[in-house]
Image (cartoon, coloured by chain):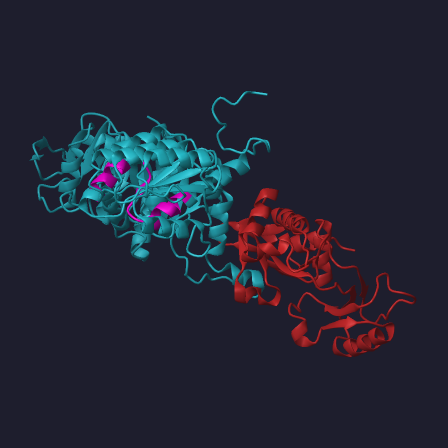
């Protein structure tokens, strides 16, 4: 497997699974997955993770997969997966597909990286799930950040109370802090090659957080 | 003489373009500079003397070294004069003319010419240049003033300890005039204009080292080097507060918004977060810029968020309470509880119908003595982190001496204090008196509360940098605490 950081440095756009490899190499948790190169079917036997699963098309040119039918959520049996796989193969015969564990619902955050014209690589955290752009509940810092910065960013959000426990929901502030620090390290090393990166959503649970979707525009 | 000193404490100044015509910039600049301690040389080839000073036809004929040359000549002539400055070995140049990069292609070409002239000079004889398109500098304590607005129309601030760096000259004149009216003083003003050479970063470094400056206020329309600015702030803000009014918040950035992060970044949110990250304060208008610089430069950081309010009007106390405690249109601070002992002491010194609960209401029968006695009690209250003193002159038992009582407690008491005065000419006179004495005092409750909020934020920032052991819960250890 080619190192995704090397690909990025040489200016090659990354597909989702490559972005996630990159995230994992900076200690950012991503869901377990298997890759299905063009022409290949499901491996025999059980998947290495439980159902439900997600089926996604992986290609650097397809930044917005949902709009082109490149994402199937909530697949709960092997039979369903075989059927969805066959259907997606007809839509994208020459592309790599990915089967990924589907993470349960939780507090949805967004974590982003952007190359700011004035300050260079900068980091964002936000809350609100699909409504983030409506609520605009976000905070930015310039890369690199320290742990105190990460905590201050989260504290600055209007929805910060979610991390103190709300209506039985628990979300680990520590887990989100850890992801922010990971993205900061990534930005420090590779920020000059990244125009923008979205980890959206990052789902935060009581004891962990995971980057469920990741998009990257190289610079 | 090192670095930028030639701009702020020159021994000799040449005014190039000095004029006999009282309406000309070259006349005003000379006239005001003649009040400074520097030896001043008018330069004008077609005059023998101006304002009683012999004129020199060019820089070369000035009989001694020139620390600072103020170029009060048009853009095209400025370029030639920069060349003369290099030949003369001038240390610092203030290029006042507009008509440079801010106007278009021809202006940019002139700036490029100046850059080339400076670059061609040997490094040890290369002058530093402020501007072009700048009023220059104003250093009140040296009466060094190259700004050329009429003083009788536009009074200047007196000596003080706030350094004010501005990218716009005309805006700075208005801000300084308003500050002067309130009694606010400056350690220095400097207009950076088009920043051809000297920029905000270098000036931050300069004023960080300047012992006369306790806070740095900047009006900026752009950053010359954003990362460099942040690095400096990170270094400077732990020991000297920096307040920034950065304009262009709503300008739509030319940024690709294909992803969410881009569309959410807008043009301004990164600036917001970046300044907060390095402990710099952001002001949103011209009034807040000076208000916060004064609060942070003169006030002491709060160790906690509990505020005692001392007032003579119940309503003002209630408004202050709302502004202090509310999260919407408020500061998110708290009212301090007053101890039973404190309440008893207050009862013993105040009129029977005064309120000894926070907000403490001295009532319309307040006197100088009531203020003094109440402040003494509050300064000793264990759960009070700061005092908001509403200084009112309406009571017949209060006189001009009240301001001095408050000034004394501000400087001698252990608690951070912010003062507010609501009222007319008499009140404003008292307000000016406390402001001139270095007390963060304001003519409205909201401005005073905002100052307290900034001091609280600064306290939090400093505590984050220097965390204390959990037992010691105060910014400054209480006096007499035994070392363990």
B191 or A146, nearer to the observer: A146
What is the x, y in percent for residue A151?
59, 47
Q: Position of residue B17 (x, y in %)?
A: 16, 41
When the figure is inspected, residue B204 is found, relative to residue B110, above or below; the finding is: above
Residue B3 horizontal side relative to residue B262, left or right: left
Whether residue B312 is in magenta: the answer is no
- Is most of the magenta stretch helix, strand or loop? helix
Say left or right for A159 vs B83: right
Task: Give me the chain that's cyan.
Answer: B
Which sits in the foreground, B168 or A102? A102
* Residue interval drawn in magenta: B428-452
* Residue B4 can be seen, yes or no: no
The extreme right residue here reads: A45
Q: Residue furthest front?
A: B352
Instruction: Tell which of B197 and B435 is nearer to you.
Output: B435
Please tell me whether residue B42 is drawn above or below residue A152 in the rendered image.
Answer: above
- Seen at 58% across and 54% down, the residue is A160
Residue B432 magenta? yes
Say which quarter of the image contains residue B393.
top left
Q: Residue at x 35, y 48 (%)?
A: B317
Q: Quadrant of the N terminus of chain A?
A: bottom right
A181 is higher (above) or lower (below) than B258: above
In the rendered view, tell whether residue B277 sits above or below residue A216: above
Q: Which hue belongs to chain A?
A: red
Of residues B42 and B86, which is closer to you in this image?
Answer: B42
């Amino acid at each position: 497997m080619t190192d995704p950081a090397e690909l990025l440095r040489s200016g090659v756009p990354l597909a989702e699974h490559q972005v996630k490899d990159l995230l994992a190499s900076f200690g950012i948790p991503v869901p377990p997955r298997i890759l299905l190169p063009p022409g290949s079917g499901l491996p025999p036997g059980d998947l290495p993770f439980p159902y439900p699963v997600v089926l996604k098309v992986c290609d650097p040119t397809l930044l917005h997969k949902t709009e082109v039918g490149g994402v199937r959520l909530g697949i709960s049996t092997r039979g369903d997966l075989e059927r969805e796989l066959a259907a997606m193969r007809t839509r994208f015969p020459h592309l790599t597909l990915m089967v990924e564990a589907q993470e349960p619902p939780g507090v949805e955050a967004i974590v982003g990286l952007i190359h700011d014209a004035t300050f260079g690589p900068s980091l964002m955290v936000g809350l609100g799930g699909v409504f983030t752009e409506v609520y605009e509940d976000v905070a930015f810092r310039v890369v690199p950040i320290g742990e105190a910065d990460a905590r201050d960013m989260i504290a600055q959000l209007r929805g910060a109370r979610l991390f103190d426990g709300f209506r039985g929901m628990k979300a680990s502030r520590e887990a989100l802090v850890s992801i922010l620090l990971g993205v900061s390290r990534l930005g420090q090393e590779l920020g000059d090659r990244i125009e923008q990166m979205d980890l959206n959503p990052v789902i935060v649970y009581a004891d962990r957080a995971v980057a469920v979707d990741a998009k990257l525009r190289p610079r | 003489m090192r670095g930028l000193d030639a701009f702020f404490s020159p021994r000799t100044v040449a005014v190039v373009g000095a004029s006999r015509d009282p309406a000309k910039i070259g006349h005003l600049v000379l006239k005001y500079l003649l009040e400074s301690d520097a030896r001043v040389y008018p330069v004008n080839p077609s005059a023998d003397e101006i304002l009683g000073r012999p004129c020199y036809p060019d820089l070369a004929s000035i009989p001694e070294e020139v620390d600072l040359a103020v170029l009060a000549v048009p853009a095209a002539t400025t370029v030639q004069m920069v060349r003369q400055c290099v030949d003369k070995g001038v240390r610092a140049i203030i290029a006042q003319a507009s008509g440079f990069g801010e106007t278009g292609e021809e202006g940019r070409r002139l700036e490029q010419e100046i850059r080339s002239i400076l670059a061609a000079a040997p490094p040890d004889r290369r002058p530093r240049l402020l501007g072009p398109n700048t009023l220059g500098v104003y250093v009140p304590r040296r009466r060094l003033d190259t700004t050329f607005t009429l003083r009788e129309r536009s009074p200047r601030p007196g000596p003080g300890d706030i350094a004010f760096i501005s990218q716009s000259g005309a805006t700075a004149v208005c801000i300084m005039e308003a500050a002067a009216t309130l009694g606010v003083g400056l350690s220095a003003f400097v207009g950076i204009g088009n920043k051809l050479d000297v920029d905000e970063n270098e000036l931050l470094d300069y004023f960080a080292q300047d012992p006369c400056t306790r806070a740095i206020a900047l009006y900026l329309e752009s950053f010359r080097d954003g990362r460099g600015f942040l690095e400096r702030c990170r270094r400077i803000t732990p020991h000297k507060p920096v307040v920034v009014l950065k304009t262009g918040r709503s300008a739509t950035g030319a940024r690709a918004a294909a992803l969410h992060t881009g569309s959410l970044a807008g043009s301004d949110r990164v600036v917001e977060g970046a300044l907060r990250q390095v402990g710099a304060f952001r002001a949103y208008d011209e009034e807040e810029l000076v208000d916060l610089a004064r609060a942070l430069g003169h006030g002491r950081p709060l160790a906690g968020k509990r505020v005692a309010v001392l007032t003579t009007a119940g309503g003002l106390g209630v408004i202050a309470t709302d502004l202090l405690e509310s999260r919407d249109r408020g500061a998110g601070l708290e009212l301090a509880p007053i101890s039973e002992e404190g309440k008893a002491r207050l009862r013993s010194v105040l009129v029977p119908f005064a309120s000894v609960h926070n907000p403490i209401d001295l009532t319309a029968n307040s006197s100088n003595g009531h203020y003094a006695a109440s402040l003494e009690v509050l300064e000793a209250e264990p759960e009070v982190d700061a005092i908001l003193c509403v200084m009112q002159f309406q009571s017949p038992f209060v006189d001009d001496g009240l301001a001095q009582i408050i000034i004394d407690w501000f400087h001698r008491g252990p608690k951070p204090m912010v003062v507010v005065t609501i009222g007319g000419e008499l009140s404003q006179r008292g307000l000016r008196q406390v402001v001139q004495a270095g007390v963060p005092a304001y003519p409205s409750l909201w401005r005073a509360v905002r100052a307290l909020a900034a001091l609280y934020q600064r306290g939090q920032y400093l505590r984050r940098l220097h965390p204390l052991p959990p037992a010691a819960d105060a910014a400054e250890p209480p006096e007499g605490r035994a070392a363990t």
